[in-house]
Image (spheres, grey):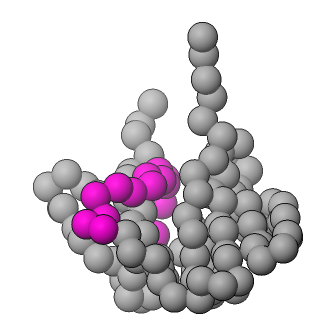
Amino acid sequence: MKFRMQHQNFNVSDLETSLRFYEKALGFTEIKRKTGDGFTIVFVGNDTTDFQLELTCLDDHPQKYDLGECEFHLAVRTEEYEKAHLLHEQMGCICFENPKMGIYFIEDPDGYWIEVLREKNR
């Protein structure tokens, strides 16, 4: 059996704030939206992959979620690592760096971490 990764879900407390963050920080834009009784789900992504990030906002849960020790993350690669680092530095969202490994992490408005990696030379 083979499986293809489809999406990752992050529950968010303020959908519009999250959408602005992901568009500015990573260039992710809205792909599709589902609205139901008490919830809104927005899938965001870009044209580099079919993988999508699902942002779920529950009407009756306006507070941030308890992410425990936050020992999980989403990872992205970029060919413009230095440019991305400068943008994220200006946004004030870099939460951890490991220069020896050539990686850093940004934190979204709800506390989720996203690892930023250099695109490997092929």
Residue 56 x/y as whole percent: 66, 68
Residue 60 vertical position relative to residue 113 in the rendered view, above or below: below
Residue 90 x/y as whole percent: 42, 88
At 61% from the left edge and 23% from the top edge, which residue is drawn?
3
Residue 78 vertical position relative to residue 108 in the rendered view, above or below: above
Q: Is residue 80 left or right of residue 8?
A: left
As drawn, which residue projects farthest toward the top?
Answer: 1
At 45% from the left edge and 30% from the top edge, which residue is drawn?
122
- Quick one: 82 or 112, which is closer to the camera? 112
Residue 36 x/y as whole percent: 85, 69
- Quick one: 3 or 26, which is closer to the camera? 3
Residue 26 vertical position relative to residue 119 in the rendered view, above or below: below
Residue 80 x/y as whole percent: 48, 60
Q: Is residue 32 left or right of residue 77?
A: right
Task: Indicate yes or no whether the magenta region holds residue 73.
Answer: yes
Residue 98 vertical position relative to residue 58 in the rendered view, above or below: above
- Quick one: 52 or 1, which is closer to the camera? 1
Q: Is residue 101 left or right of residue 68?
A: left
Task: Indicate yes or no whether the magenta region holds residue 2.
Answer: no
At 60% from the left edge and 11% from the top edge, which residue is drawn?
1
- Quick one: 51 or 98, which is closer to the camera? 51
- Span shown in magenta: 68-84
At 18% from the left edge and 61% from the top edge, which residue is drawn?
99
**Whether residue 28 can be seen here:** no
